[in-house]
Image (cartoon, rainbow, N blue to C red):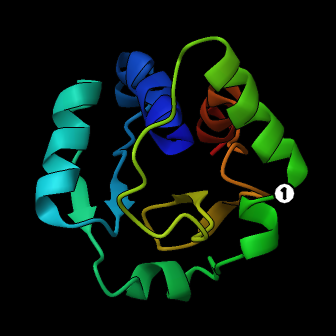
Amino acid sequence: MHCLKHAVQVHQSKSEFEALGTQVLIIGFQETQVSRQWLERSGVSFPFLMDLDREVYRAYGLGRSIWRSWHPRNLWSYFKKMLAGQGLPRITADPNQMGGDFIVDRNGVVRLAYFSDDPTDRPDVEHLLTVFRDL
């Protein structure tokens, strides 16, 4: 759910990322049909790479955490959404898989490694753009 929101926010700045000569990739581990629906619903047009075995997730040190996924702060944010009538999306993948954002330069050097503290935690888009501008 929060990954979708973040991807949409990054996509809204797509022209800025492209002007900086960057290539944004989304890597996911959900089944193909679920991923297609996710992309169609979001309108995000970045390349989407499937990592069904989560090899990339492991290579970048993105673990799983029941505590961070179901932390009271997250449960509270879900509860507020329900009270506001927004409802919750159906969980179709591993809700305990932590995500992250990484910036890798042309030489394969990781310039930013952002490990999400919980499913709601993503870096600000302006921060990502700043890192690219500073390369």
Residue 108 position in % (x across, y down): 48, 74
Which residue is labeled 1 in the image? 71
Given residues 128 and 54, the one toward you in this image is 54
Q: Is residue 54 above or below residue 17?
A: below
Q: How many marks?
A: 1
Q: Residue at x 53, y 87 (%)?
A: 58
Q: Is residue 48 above or below residue 52?
A: above
Res. 40 image quadrant = top left
For the residue carrying disc 1, how many other residues have a C-alpha within 10 Å: few (<14), some (14-19), or many (20+)? few
Residue 74 position in % (x across, y down): 78, 45
Res. 99 image quadrant = bottom right
Q: Is residue 75 left or right of residue 87?
A: right
Q: Residue at x 65, y 23 (%)?
A: 81
Q: Residue at x 62, y 46 (%)?
A: 135
Q: What amino acid type is highlighted by mark number 1? A: His
Given residues 122 and 66, the one toward you in this image is 66
